Each structure stands twice: as structure tokens, then as C-alpha cells.
Image: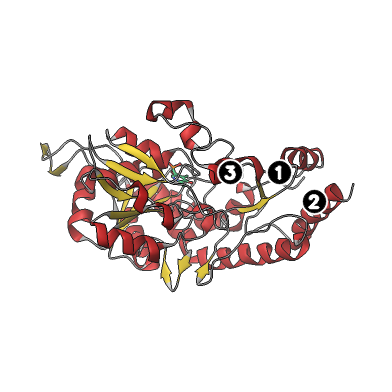
Amino acid sequence: MIPLLDLKRQYQLLEKEINSALVRVAASGNYILGPEVKAFEDEFARYVGAKHAVGVGNGTDALRIALKALDVGPGDEVITVPFTFVATAEAIAELGARPVFVDIDPRTFNMDPNLVEGAITPRTKGIIPVHLYGQVANTEALGRICEARGLFMLEDAAQAAGAARNGRRAGSIGTAAIFSFYPTKNLSAIGDGGMITTNDPAVAERIRLLRVHGSAKKYEHTELGYNSRLDELQAAVLRVRLPHLDAWNARRREIARIYDAELAGLVETPFVEPGCEHIYHQYTIIAERRDELALFLKERGIGTAIHYPLPLHLQPSFAYLGYKPGDFPVSESMAKKVISLPIFPELSDQEALEVAAAIKSFYSR
Ligand SMILES: *Cc1c(COP(=O)(O)O)cnc(C)c1O
């Protein structure tokens, strides 16, 4: 059996340190917004290269709170991609704004900057590029558009902790950025967790209020907010793991090099844009007869996943936006062809070679 991801191996690696962090918090009597969250925010901000980091309940809340802090509300439009996890667009819609989709670049799976100008209207407030699978979107081209048109750029870096583009880490590039520490992400908690980073002190301050019911002073509320804090226990675990993130991302790249070499010519392996440091949150290939391949691997005990099988503009929950099949042909085509292979730092070379061998035997039948 080779699972897509094995969270137990990840825990066992640092079992002692994690257990003692958990006990330290339990014994402290300090459970909400205590010293662990404060310390992790500082450590994470420094790691990413952003001035401020604010811990929140999860990545979805991070999107909502960041958008609210960037003044998104009813009547506004925010441009994003339909080829992402649902949360990216859900957060826009939940604030009463309209998600406006643009298609992706077929080589990188990320927002195609050439399509953004055409989607801008007088109601457009900003854009949310997603650094899908762990590769930073084309933030140079997107940044030029945002600057010229007075738009914010909110990076959805939920899959990209540690990824970089031309020397700048995800989370330090846009007006603000969001991260998720959901257990399957490449920097993960043992439950839910999220973070917002920004270089703008006013945005950071507003986010700090929004996560505690819009309150700077106890029982005084300047605006409607949320109850969404990074948990003290999760912060303590994340502090144990963050120092290992670069080594883990490097190991992911090693595994990717094995797949790249073994699968060349059989499937389309991930394209890495010049200047990008891909961290392979997912190793996602474009494969002929994708569904048959998934079944073949499953029968041999190899875990795979489809990220993502139905683009957001075709989801029933977004039917009210009025999009139709054919509107975003690249996203629709990728949804039918992509498949993600097992990749996590504790996966052995031998296991990666076995996955590759199974794929070779599928295409040689
Ligand atoms: C995981 C993820 C989110 C949401 O994070 P949660 O912590 O699960 O709420 C948002 N965007 C993307 C691209 C994600 O992969």
C-alpha cells in the first residue's frame, strides 16, 4: 500500500517534540491567543518575509477575514480562477461580492494574466491568484495589472508555504496572503488552522480586530467580526514543524525529480516556470485515460486524487453566477485530465519508483 499522504508518519517523525508542546499548552492554562500564537505569528512572518502575520481559525476564514479587511462587500467584484478549491470563491460570495472567474494557463494551472484585463469592470476591487499545487502564480504580470488599475492582490497561498518566485516567498508578494494549516497541507497542524500575512500595518491591525468580533477593547465592537483564532495548541505544534519546512519542501522536490525522470514521455509532468521554486504540495500530472489509470493504481494499493474534478463555475452552488460549460475551456479540460500522485516528505525513493513502475505498466498494456 502506498497512500497519497500518510499523516501518521509525519507525526511520528517529531512525536516527542509535538507531545511536549501539547502538554506545555495544556498545563499553561493559557488557551486562546496566548504566547504560542504570538510566537508562531512572529516566526511565520519572518519565514515568509512579510511584516505581519495574524493567526486565524482556518484557511477559509483567512480568506473571508482578509477580504473584509480589504473592504470587499456587496456590489464588489473579485477576480479569481475556477480551477481551485471551493473556499477561494466561496469567501468572495459570502461577503456579498461576486466572484468573477478567469481561466488558467495550461502549463502552470495558475491564473492566466493575459485574461485579467478583460474581466475588470468598474466594480472590480481586486484579484485572488491561487498558487496551485505549490507553484507561485505569475505575480509579476498580475502585480503590474493591479498597480495600474488600483486593485488589491490577495495571494491564496494555502498550498504554497515556502514556495518562492524570483527570490520572493509566497505570502510576501501581494497586498495580503492567506495560508491554511489543514492536516493535508505541506505545513500542517493536527487540526484546523490558518494565517494571514501582509506588509500593510493598517490591514494587519484590522484583521486582528476582525478575528475577535471586531473588538480592540473588551466588549466594545467597532465593526461586525468573527470568532476565528489560530488555536494555541495548533500554534505550539506548528512551531515544532516550521523549522523543518525547508528540508521537507526540498525532499518533495527530490521525489518530484524521481517522478519527472521516470514518467517523461508517458504523461505530462509538472512544468516549473523559470524563477519559480515549486514546493510540490501536489505532484499533479496530465494523463491520457486518467480515470482508468486512477482505477488501475487503486487496484494496486496506490493512492491518488483528482484536484479538482469539477471547476467552480460549474458547481451547483455557483449556478446563480450564470456561467455555462465552455466558458473556461482550459479549466474544464484539466479537470478531466489531471491526477495527483503520492508525494510527502516521508515517502521513500523506493515507493516513488513503485508508483512510477505501476504507471509504466499501465501505459505499456
Ligand atoms: C485548503 C485550501 C483552502 C482552505 O483552507 P482550509 O484551512 O481548509 O479552510 C483555500 N484555498 C486553497 C487553494 C486550499 O487548498
Q: Residue at x 42, y 48 (%)?
A: 234
- The one of 181 and 115 positioned closer to us in this rendering: 115
Determine which of the numbered discs, if any, sits on residue 263 in the image: none
Residue 113's place in the image compared with 64, above or below, is below
Between the residue at mark 2 and the residue at mark 3, the CA separation in whole angstroms equals 18 Å
**Residue under the image location 75 percent in, 42 percent down:** 289
Instruction: Residue 346: give x, y in percent of width and height.
Output: 65, 58
- Residue drawn at (45%, 49%) of the image: 181
Q: Which residue is mark 2?
A: 359
The image quadrant in which ligand 1 is located: top left
Which residue position is annotated with label 1?
A: 303
Secondary structure at numbered mark 3: loop
The residue beneath circle 3 is: 307
User: Looking at the image, do the residues carrying marks 3 and 1 touch, with CB atoms under 8 Å apart?
Assistant: no
Q: Is residue 290 left or right of residue 115?
A: right
Is disc 2 in contact with disc 3, using a CB cutoff of under 8 Å?
Answer: no
Total of numbered circles in the picture?
3
Disc 2 residue crowd, few under 14, some 14–19, many 20+, Cα 10 Å: some
261 above or below 80? below
Distance, label 2 to label 1, CA atoms, is: 12 Å
Rounded to the nearest angstrom, the CA distance separating label 3 from label 1 is: 13 Å
